Amino acid sequence: MSTPTLEQVNAALATVNDPEIKRPITELGMVDRVEIGADGTVSLTVLLTVAGCPLKDTINRDVTAAVSRVAGVTGVDLQLGVMSDEQRSAMRDTLRGGQAQREITFAQPGSLTKVYAIASGKGGVGKSSVTVNLALALAGQGLKVGIVDADIYGHSIPAMLGVADMRPTQVDDLIMPVPTESGVSVISIGMLKPRRDQVVAWRGPMLDRALVQMLADVYWGDLDALVLDLPPGTGDMAISLGQHLPNAEFVVVTTPQEAAAEVAERAGTMASMMHQRVIGVVENMSYLPCPHCEAEGKEHRLEIFGSGGGARVAQTLSQRFGYDVPVLGTIPIDVALREGGDAGAPIVTTAPQSPAGAEFLKIASTISGRGRGLAGMQLGLTPANRF
Ligand SMILES: Nc1ncnc2c1ncn2[C@@H]1O[C@H](COP(=O)(O)OP(=O)(O)OP(=O)(O)O)[C@@H](O)[C@H]1O
């Protein structure tokens, strides 16, 4: 068999993406040296962005596999090095596209990324569970999805995705979102704290800075959808989001309970006050399928938290805003959903056919299939003066 050529090896390396940046390692200046021996062995050095890169094993495996597949390659001798400061700066410039200023690309007029903000009035109604499962369901449609966990009180998203202990890699002032097995990348306000157990006792300006950091200083690449988990209520984070991402579309999560519905209406109204559009309501913990009845082949729903909260929020917000705010779905209480959240294995991936899993998939296709409506959104038009 003939010796492989440098072009063939480079072409194989171009198929390997950096797992955090999700761009070919050849484009990022990570391939430092390639030598091909007469016997078909390929000896090469790949530079990691930082020493102790948490994903070096993935890079090692992917590079070795890609080069081994080239016809005529008899062995791969891969050395992993670390980029110099200059090489890192050059890569950061490539990623920033030559743009020195930090800016929130999702807020730019031409942005093709759909931004979904998941909000609730009360804590504990399942907003983070909805965020994670919807994001994964969107990713399952082949979309490139990122999650921003902006919930200062209960930044539980990394644990729900099985990356609780991961810290983002930083290349100078550019932060890499943490990749997960599902393909969805995540950054959490909890990852910006020096220690995991530290309490986030930040006032408005600090929260604003943290939000901007998660949106502008993180290299998100070309996302189809960005899903944000907001803190419950109508506080500083919701105001900051309104200022920085006026194009965000809101999904309001509530339980069927009257008390949860009432505060959820306020969270939806807050979004509208910030000129953001509320695209629908998800009612979570709607009912518990009666296990005894199921065993007898009958269907019976135990309405543990009452009924009608989701419909009530949807109706009130529709009347208040003058456009249709539908109930996007009703998620049952499901022990597997809770267990999946605790174990970092969300139900849409482990049991997509379960009633809860199927409902998340349905909601994801409803929201991703919608065109971008203009009602309720800020158009950036200055009203003409009337004389
Ligand atoms: N439909 C459901 N069935 C069973 N358990 C659920 C369901 N929805 C959420 N849970 C569980 O309820 C708890 C609270 O959910 P979650 O963290 O998603 O709520 P949250 O609204 O984001 O809370 P917070 O705002 O306090 O972070 C979690 O343990 C989660 O696994």
Image (tube, grey):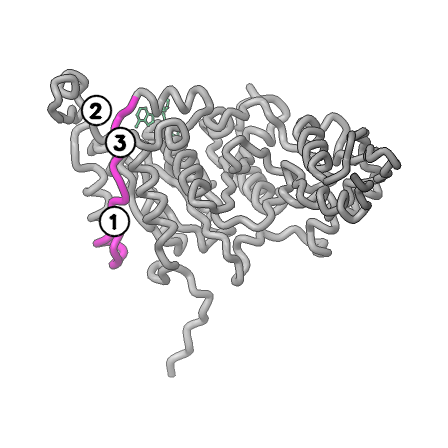
> Is 3 left or right of 173, judged from the image as shown?
right
Q: Is residue 175 magenta?
A: no
> Is 204 left or right of 53, judged from the image as shown?
left
Q: Amino acid at mark 1?
A: Pro
Return the mark for residue 107: none
> Which of the two residues, 359 or 32, is positioned nearer the viewer here?
32
Q: Amino acid at mark 3?
A: Pro
Q: Is residue 44 visible?
A: no
- What separation in Å lies between label 1 and label 2 (alpha carbons)? 22 Å
- Which marked residue is nearer to the observer: mark 1 or mark 2? 2
- What separation in Å lies between label 3 and label 1 (alpha carbons)? 20 Å
Question: Which residue corresponds to the image point at 77% horizontal and 35% vertical from the top-left?
Answer: 73
Q: Secondary structure at mark 2?
A: strand
Return the mark for residue 355: 3
Q: Mark 3 or mark 2, which is nearer the start of the sequence?
A: 2
Residues drawn in magenta = 318-334
Picture coordinates of residue 177 (x, y %)? 60, 37
Q: Amino acid at mark 2?
A: Leu
> Which of the two residues, 298 or 234, is positioned nearer the viewer here?
298
Count of marks placed on residues: 3
Return the mark for residue 326: 1
Badge 3 residue CB within 8 Å of ligand 1: no
| Up-down relation of residue 364 to residue 346 (above or below) | below
